[in-house]
Amino acid sequence: MRSKGLDYFILALAIIGAINWGLVGIFKINLVSYLFGSMSWVSRIIYALVGLCGLYLLSFYGRISSFGRE
């Protein structure tokens, strides 16, 4: 059984990462680098967490069809 709170936290972190990529692509503003420094250890941890969240969210594809059956 999975925790809905964890799912929401991971989804929120992935959305924040996606917004950061949108800012980079449209305005050339990297919010993570601006706040924490360019490739500092904090920035690297944030990027790694966003990447891991993205991998975790791949499991949502298998769960989408089972949402209505719970």
Image (cartoon, grey):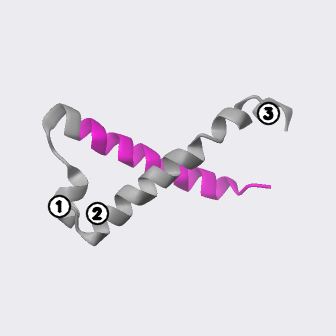
Q: Residue furthest bottom?
A: 41
Q: For numbered disc 1, what is the local secondary structure?
A: loop
Chief secondary structure of the magenta portion:
helix
Q: Position of residue 19 (x, y in %)?
A: 33, 41
Quadrant where the N terminus is found in the figure: bottom right
Disc 3 marks a residue whose amino acid type is Ser
Earlier-in-chain disc, 3 versus 2:
2
**Disc 1 to disc 2, how far (Cα)?**
7 Å
- Is residue 3 or residue 61 the one in the foreground? 61
Q: Are marks 1 and 2 in contact (CB under 8 Å)?
A: yes
Q: Are marks 3 and 2 in contact (CB under 8 Å)?
A: no
Disc 1 marks a residue whose amino acid type is Ser
Which of labels 3 and 2 is toward the front? 2
Q: For numbered disc 3, what is the local secondary structure?
A: loop
Of the numbered discs in the image, which one, if any, rests on residue 21?
none
Q: Residues within 10 Å of mark 2 (few under 14, many from 20)?
A: some
**Disc 3 to disc 2, how far (Cα)?**
36 Å
Which residue is denoted by mark 1 in the rendering? 38
- Is residue 53 or residue 31 the one in the foreground? 53
Q: Is residue 12 magenta?
A: yes
**Disc 3 to disc 1, how far (Cα)?**
41 Å
Q: Residue at x 54, y 55 (%)?
A: 9
Earlier-in-chain disc, 3 versus 1:
1
Which residue is denoted by mark 2 in the rendering? 43
Q: Which residues are magenta?
A: 1-23
Above or below 58: residue 12: below
Which residue is denoted by mark 3 in the rendering? 66
